[in-house]
Amino acid sequence: MFNYRKNHLRAKIVIITILLIAVSFYSGIIFSKKTEIDEKLVNKDTVFIGEVLNKYETNKRENIAEDVNFRLFWEVWDIIKNKYVDAGKLKDKEMFYGALRGLVASAGDPYTVFMNPVVSKEFADDLKGTFDGIGAEIGIKNGVLTIIAPLTDMPAQKAGLRSGDKVLAIDGEDTAAITLDEAVNKIRGEDGTEVALKIWREGFEEPKEFTVTRGKIIVKSVKWELNDNNMMVIEISHFNSDTDELFDRAVQDTIKKNPKGVILDLRNNPGGYLNTAIETASEWIEDGVVVIEKFSEENKNEYLARGRARLKDFPTVVLVNQGSASASEIVAGALKDHDLATIVGEKTFGKGSVQEMTSLEDGSSVKVTIAKWLTPNGINISEEGIAPDEEAGLTSEEYEKDIDPQMDKAVEILNSKEQ
């Protein structure tokens, strides 16, 4: 489980998710430093008495390279409070948190974000795999709000949303300059309510509007079955808190049934916990590097396989698409670089950064990008993604008819290895 104490925990944009999943909206591998959170501070009904704490701090700040006059902050504060046409509707706490969001946003990184106490708690709850939303991962891709991964059988997928869809408007509001947290706040909502998304998709002559009814999202991250070709298909939708146990059961079942091959389906998997990704890859990789954490050219960490490798002797195909991001890219990249699997599908999303999340004393938190991920062979996941060994697309027509040429290609490859 996600831990609020001072344990070190690593999780994935992207990323991180909408909740849609809320993990989704901030998806990315997360390195967290947590302190105790007072539950009353994440209660939307909490009443604040209006005391201004630490308004003036005279100690010299070692990490400020030039003079900064914080009186300007209070001058702007007073101007807004005194002159804004609807000043009576302003809430001091929201103004303060808005200023902190702007401060963090100045980094220019969509995955470096400030989260108020309510959003911080939602983020942690979402990592448990239960939440209200539309059931899709979103991210900013080439400056455009994009559907990274709609979850199987969730409202977004049922409404017809696809990986790679560009979200041009939310309930009629343009998304051209929207941030991830703003998009999540607009898209997520209570079970049974609706949200309208204006979507552009390759092949559309013009954008189309999709109305999605939000629902209760309960996700088991791993599913597996032996298909008609005597191949074990293991689908991992997220690397979440339940993944290790479920994947271990899948591995045991695979060994018991002794299929002629394994198909690891990571399509539309936006990521999750780093440790879980390493545990997963280690079921194929007996020794060696799984992923490299790069802070700078001089400062790098190598994460090694755990040495089990129970699936190393099974021919394996990994399915990926543009909805595969972060932790799923770590697994795919590691198996590819160690020549333990054939990668089939489309080039992955390219979300290979590390976020450190620190809880603040009032229950809010700051998530900051501190490093990037490289595959064992040094491929920068954020810049290059994971390229498939065998390209295979999936058209809208095929999708609607339940035709899966990517899965068919995986079966073809494993059949050829048996000959």
Image: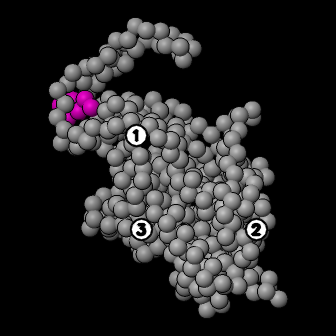
Going from N to C along the chain, the mark reached first, 3 or 2, is 3
Q: Position of residue 340 (x, y in %)?
A: 76, 68
Residue ID for mark 2: 340
Residue nearest the viewer, comparing 25 with 334: 334
Residue 5's disc is 1
370 displayed left or right of 311: left
Numbered disc 2: secondary structure:
loop
Residue ID for mark 3: 219
Going from N to C along the chain, the mark reached first, 1 or 3, is 1
Going from N to C along the chain, the mark reached first, 2 or 1, is 1
Q: What residue is rendered at 75% in x and 32% in y? A: 298
Residue nearest the viewer, comparing 145 with 406: 406
Give, as a single range, the part of the protein colored magenta. Answer: 87-93
Seen in the picture, residue 259 relative to 294 is either above or below; the reply is: below
For the residues labelled 3 and 2, say whether their Cβ atoms are less than 8 Å apart.
Answer: no
Q: What residue is rendered at 27% in x and 60% in y? A: 190
Q: Is residue 386 visible?
A: no
Numbered disc 1: secondary structure:
loop
State the residue lying farthest toward the right: 419
Going by the numbered disc 2, the residue's amino acid type is Leu
Q: What residue is rendered at 36% in x and 62% in y? A: 130
Q: Is residue 374 visible?
A: yes
